[in-house]
Image (cartoon, rainbow, N blue to C red):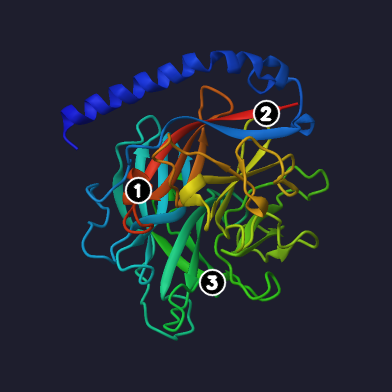
Amino acid sequence: MGSPERAMLLALLSCQAAANVAANDATWHESSANDATWRESSATSVTNATLRYLSGGVVPILNGSTPGMVPKVGNNTLGVEDGTIVVVDGMLHMFPTEMHCGWTKTRVVHFTAPLDDNLTWTFRGGVTPYGHGVCDVDDHHAKLWSGSPQWEAPRPGEPEGRWYMSVVGYNEDCEDKAGGTDGRILMFRSATAGRGGIDGPYEELDDILKADGLVPMAGASVLRPYRSALPDDPPGRLWAFYGSGWDTGQCYSDTGVLGPWTRAPTGNPRPIGNWSDGGPENPLVFKSRSGVYLLIWAANLLQVEHGLAFAWSKDGVNWEDNTGGGIRTGKAGYMIPVSPPGHVAFRTPLALVEHEERDNFFTLFFTAFENDHANPAAPIGGYENAYASEVELVLTF
């Protein structure tokens, strides 16, 4: 994108954001989630939560012409999906899955952008090697997906702290083209200590989470740890979603990201979706400054038509999937539009990043099929871009 066009687009987005702020001032002042009344209350008093689409989600922030993105060549070059984004020292760090050869031989890659300019992305390179793509080799390195960084604070032996990166490794079953039921959580460790080590390079340690004893007949498919608000949790306990695209549960670790991880004793698999309602893919949890936990995922049979799947929680473990302000779709929860009509198509979430200057306003990063996002009548599939929308967390008390 040339500089005149880019300047015009940035100006347009800035004006659009300003207009949205003004248009939503009434909501802002009326919502106790966004004023002094909320600051004196607690997330425990929330009775309903939803995400309200405000703007964006039409112009891709990453596409086939972005330096470092796989160019659109042939039918097997599919762009990026899955993974997540973290903010470190004013920079966005994105770790999506690069699909240069369809769903196999994938790798996790790294892009960065300034927090205040999510149109300017720099390709930092691969985090993992390419999957080997060889059939029926039981090493879970045929295809590598869903990079998710986790900061481990300073401790004995690690005085500066360290970044770890969970990655999902799959075998290649040439009789099962879809795959996805034998995933293992592989762990990579930054060779560079301290917060700056987010840039890597990363070295592989071992697989830390297997399907055995966790989710029946399905493998792990994502691991993005966070801390809950349960009052009886021991200090330092981490929670995470795991599971395949069709059966998802929660587990916890009391010894950091390396585990061991233990299956939650009750409530698994979590009631946030199943194959008939749209299997949950890439479930990600983010805690808002209001104290409410937000769970977003892709409901695989429904997201192209309805957008983002959404649930919320007061403690990060017990989820409300029967309230919200979107379209009710059964066990897949509530579906939230991510862009204006005609551009609703959605593939996978990447992150919710809360605005530093305004509580309960977020940038939602996600991937979508380029053709389907521009034209809902187009066949589903093809190259995937990354997009960003502005959304508001609306809470009821």
Q: Is residue 62 above or below residue 339?
A: below
Residue contact between numbered discs 3 and 2, judged by CB atoms under 8 Å: no
Q: Which of marks 1 and 2 is nearer the N terminus?
A: 1
Which residue is situated farthest in the bottom direction here?
Answer: 136
Q: Is residue 194 visible?
A: no
Q: Give the number of the mark in front: 3 or 1.
A: 3
Q: Earlier in the sequence, mark 3 or mark 1?
A: 1
Q: Which of 253 and 155 is in front in this view?
A: 253
User: What is the x, y in percent for residue 81?
Assistant: 41, 55
Residue that carries the numbered disc 2 in the rendered image: 395
Residue that carries the numbered disc 1 in the rendered image: 111
Instruction: Name the residue: 46% across, 58% down.
Output: 147
Q: How crowded is mark 2: few (under 14 residues within 10 Å), some or many (20 or more)?
A: many
Is 233 on the left-hand or right-hand side of 219?
Answer: right
Quadrant location of residue 145?
Answer: bottom left
Which residue is situated farthest in the right direction here?
Answer: 232
